Amino acid sequence: MIGNLVSIKFQRLKYVVSDLISTMFGFVIFNIVRYSILGISGSQIPLIDYLCTPILVIEQIFVPLIVLCVFWLSGYYNHPFDKSRLDELSTTILSSIFNTIWIYLALLINDQIYGHAKGYELVIVLFLCLFTFTYICRLLITMHATKHFADMRWGFNTIMVGDSDNAMRTADRLLKSQKKLGYNIIAHIPIEGEKSSALPHTTIDRKKLENMCRSGHVDQIILDMESPSEDKLLKMLYTLLPLNVPIRLAPTSISLLSNKIRLNDVYAEPFVDITSPAVTEFTKNLKRTIDVTVSALALLMLMPVMAVFAIAVKRSSPGPVFYSQERVGIHQKIFKIYKFRSMREDAESTGPQLSDDNDPRVTPIGHIMRKYRIDELPQFWNILKGDMSLVGPRPEREYYIRQLVAIIPYYTLLHQVRPGLTSWGMVKYGYARTVDEMVKRAQFDIIYLSNMSISMDVKIMLHTINTVISGKGV
C-alpha cells in the first residue's frame, strides 16, 4: 500500500532516474544523427572520435542534468502517484520544446554555418530524441503504477472525516471505483452533532489520527460533512491542517473552498484539494526557485548594509541585535521569524502587544528601520530556509490567529501557502495596529490566495520596493 514517505520518494526516484537515462541516451542518438546531417563523415572523422571530442563529452555530461532541472521545474515530479495521461503527455511535450530551444540557442546555433535547412533538421531531430525516449519511459512507469492500483496491490490510505449518509454514499462510490482510483479507506472519524450511519470501517479519534499521520500511514483525508456551513468547514479545516496530509473536500460539501476547482481526471471523484492553492505545479516550483535565488542574492548583496545596521542596533540600546519570534507558517507549522530588533528588549514583558506609529517601545534606530522596512531584511534567511516566500500572507503569532479565526474562520485558508516577506495586504493596508485592522488586512490576502500567479507576485514586489524607497513602511 502507498502510505509512507519512502514509497513516494521511491516512485519519484524512478521517474528521475528514467528521465536522466533516457535523456542521456536520446542526446547520444541526436549526436549520431547530427554527425550524419552535418556531413562530418565526409571529412573522414570516425564517428567514435567525433562523439569523444572534449566539447561533446562535456555536453553529454551537463545537458542531461540541465534537462532534468527543467523537468523538475515543470512540476512533473511533485506528485508521482497522481498523474493524468493527458497531463503527462502535455507536460513532456512542453518540457521537451523548452529544452530543445535552450539547447539549440546554447549549443547548436553555430551549426547554422551548414545552412538553415540543416538547422531545421537538427531542431526537429533534437526534439524527437528528447521527447520520444523520455515519454516512452515515463509512460511505462505510469502504466506499471496504474496496473498495481487496478489490481489493488497499491492504494491510497484514506481517512474519512464524517460518517453521515453523505459520507456513506461517498465511501460507497470510492469502494466501487477502487480498481480505477486506488482509494483504500482505512478508518473514519465521526463529526460531533452529525447522525451516524455506521460506516463499515474502523472508528478512530483525533489522537489516533494524529499518530497515524505522523507515522506516515495516511495518504489523504476526505472531509464529507452532512450539512456543511462555511464556518463549520473552515473551523474543521483549522484542526486538520497541522496534520500535514492532503485534505480533500467531498463534492457534496460546497462552499467558497470550492473556488477554482481543477479536475485531473474526468472519471475521478471531483474532490477539492483544500491544502494547496489552485495554481499549477510549474507555478509552485517557479515561485520557490525565485524565492531561493532572490533571497540568496539579497543576503550576499545586502551584507554590508545589514552589518551597518547590526552595529547601530547594538549601540542604540541594550539587548541582542536580532529578534526572533515564533510565527505560524504553511499548514500551521511553527517557525522562528528573524528581524533586526527595533524595540527595547523588554517590549513584551507583559505579553503580546501590537505596535503603532508612536510606540514608545521603539528605539531611535528602530524608527528608521521600520520606516524603510530594514528590520525585515533578516527574513531573507527565513525565505532561503523555506519557512517563508517573498510574497504571501504575512505570518502571525498563534495568539492572534486564534482571535482571527474566531472572527473570520476563512483566515484558516491562508495557511495553504508559505507566508511572505510582503503581501497584498501589506501593500494595500500596511502594518496592523489592532486585531480589527488585522481582519481588514486578511481580506486582501484572501483575495491574493484566489489570484496567485508569478505576475501578481511581481506587481506586489514592485509596490513594496516603492514603499521602501519612499519611506512609507510605517
Image (cartoon, grey):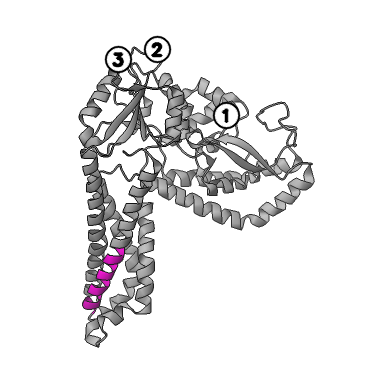
Q: Where is residue 33, by image quadrant?
A: bottom left
Cα distance, mark 1 to mark 2? 27 Å
Q: Residue shown at 57%/45% (left/top)?
A: 382
Q: Name the amino acid type tagged 2.
A: Gly
Q: What is the residue that sits farthest to the bottom in this orientation?
A: 44
Nearer the observer, 61 or 207: 207
Mark toward the start of the polypeptide (3 vs 1): 3
Q: Residue shown at 60%/26% (left/top)?
A: 399
Main secondary structure of the magenta stretch: helix
Instruction: Look at the image and tell me whether residue 265 can be seen.
Output: yes
Residue wearing tag 1:
398
Nearer the observer, 243 or 224: 243
Q: Which mark is residue 197?
A: 3
Cα distance, mark 3 to mark 1? 36 Å
- Dot 2 lies on which element? loop
Residue 130 at x, y = what percent?
27, 62
Segment tinted magenta in the rendering: 23-38
Camera-near label (2 vs 3) is: 3
Q: Residue shown at 72%/26% (left/top)?
A: 350
- Dot 3 lies on which element? loop
Q: Name the amino acid type tagged 3.
A: Ser
Mark toward the start of the polypeptide (1 vs 2): 2
Q: Dot 3 surroundings within 10 Å: few (below 14), some, or many (20 or more)? A: some
Nearer the observer, 151 or 376: 151
Q: Where is residue 116, by image quadrant?
A: bottom left
Q: Dot 2 surroundings within 10 Å: few (below 14), some, or many (20 or more)? A: few
Residue wearing tag 2:
193
